[in-house]
Image (tube, rainbow, N blue to C red):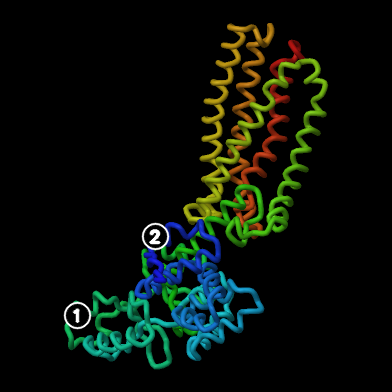
Amino acid sequence: MTIVDPEPIFPHELRDAWPALSRDERVESFKLVPHATADDFFLSLSAPEQLELILALAPAERRTWMRLLAPDDAVDVVQAAPLEVRESLLGELDEATRREAHALLAYAEDDAGGLMNPRFARVRPEMTIDEAISYLRKQTREKVETVYYAYVLDSQQHLLGVVSLRQLFQASPGKRVDEVMRRDVVTVSEDTDQEAVSHLFSEHGFMAIPVVDGEKRMKGIVTVDDIVQVVQEEATEDIQKVGGMEALDAPYLEVGFLAMLKKRAGWLMVLFLGEMLTATAMGYFEEEIARAVVLSLFIPLIISSGGNSGSQATTLIIRSLALSEVRLRDWWLVARRELAAGLALGTILGCVGIVRILLWQGLFHSYGEHAVKVAFTVGLSLVGVVMFGTLSGSMLPFVLRRVGFDPASASAPFVATLVDVSGLVIYFTVASVILRGALL
């Protein structure tokens, strides 16, 4: 009987199928990837996916894959692991990498120190260009994997400047490094938040940013590869909060059912209690509704328009704050802009509402003899409600940022609930003025 070896799987084929595979299928498929390309495929996976593979492999194979990782990537895998297996994973690393990993684990995960790679290309200022290039070649053979820039350090590891590979290759061989290096280096401290680091990458377009301590000693680099995942995580967290729930700490299908309920139920209860104020407001205007039942037909129209305009405004401002397009000091500019936008948008919706009511009255006589006054009541109410919605929706993120909370907590459902109550008050106040002596 002839045993046929299974056909190899190429990385691009496995990458396409990866999300749909179970854990066992992933492991079996990964074993079929040719050895020459398996390393690159493994390094392209996220830390949780790398951990999943490592824990599923035989103990003898774990060391190979753990030692393939750079120190910062190894730390990401360890942090994604359950507490009881973290030490065993660290034990698979070589001694030098283990020391570097322990040092990185002392930093918070969302700080620059927790993101940085302690291995970077370095040169001395007194080196000639030829000596620097030769030294960089030696470093890349030994342990440095990422060489975007060479950092110029003195004997105490203080950062003096930076030089790009292009500058090195273009310079005359006999020149010294300190003659071609750039001295005004953009750096971050070890405790700089990852979101602030991502803004620097976006602002300057760097491939790597050095991390320094309080005495300007260089500790490592944060690369653009590291920050891409951070940006995705931050955006995901903001989107989930804007949707009216707590941010998930893991992919959707990996979050337990009870944990999912906990993260969603809290906000839903707050929103539900807020919506109960709508019933209170309607009870306050019970007599007006009883005398002019036709007004109740337009309540959903009024409050939904205000909620939608508020949700639009809060979403725009939350994202603008996240991207540093606007700052706290810009609140007055934003307020004026959104007030004008609310007036314009409310006028547009109000005109559409008036035309619709008058058209239906002409065709079907739906709203009685006071249809014109009802139409203008709805139209003016829409102007007021949309103005209030855009203004409150745009200002709430500023208020939350000012008191130290995440602006993303100003979720669209929360703003909509707030505007629902105020929208009823505006609607029936306008109605009491226009319809007094007619329906009221």
Q: How many dots with numbers?
A: 2
The residue that disc 2 covers is 13
For label 1, the crowd category at 10 Å Cα-Cα, with few meaning under 14, some 14 to 19 and many 20 or more, is: some
The residue that disc 1 covers is 171
Contact check, label 2 and label 1, Cβ < 8 Å: no
SS class of the residue under badge 2?
helix
Q: Say which quadrant the C terminus sits in.
A: top right
Of labels 2 and 1, the one closer to you: 2
Residue 354 appears at what percent x and percent y? 58, 17
Residue 359 appears at what percent x and percent y? 57, 11
Residue 144 appears at what percent x and percent y? 37, 82
Give above or below for 229 relative to 294.
below
* Residue at left offset 66%, top offset 51%: 245
Residue 416 appears at what percent x and percent y? 65, 39
Q: Say which quadrant the N terminus sits in.
A: bottom left
Q: CA distance from mark 2 to mark 1?
A: 44 Å
SS class of the residue under badge 1?
loop
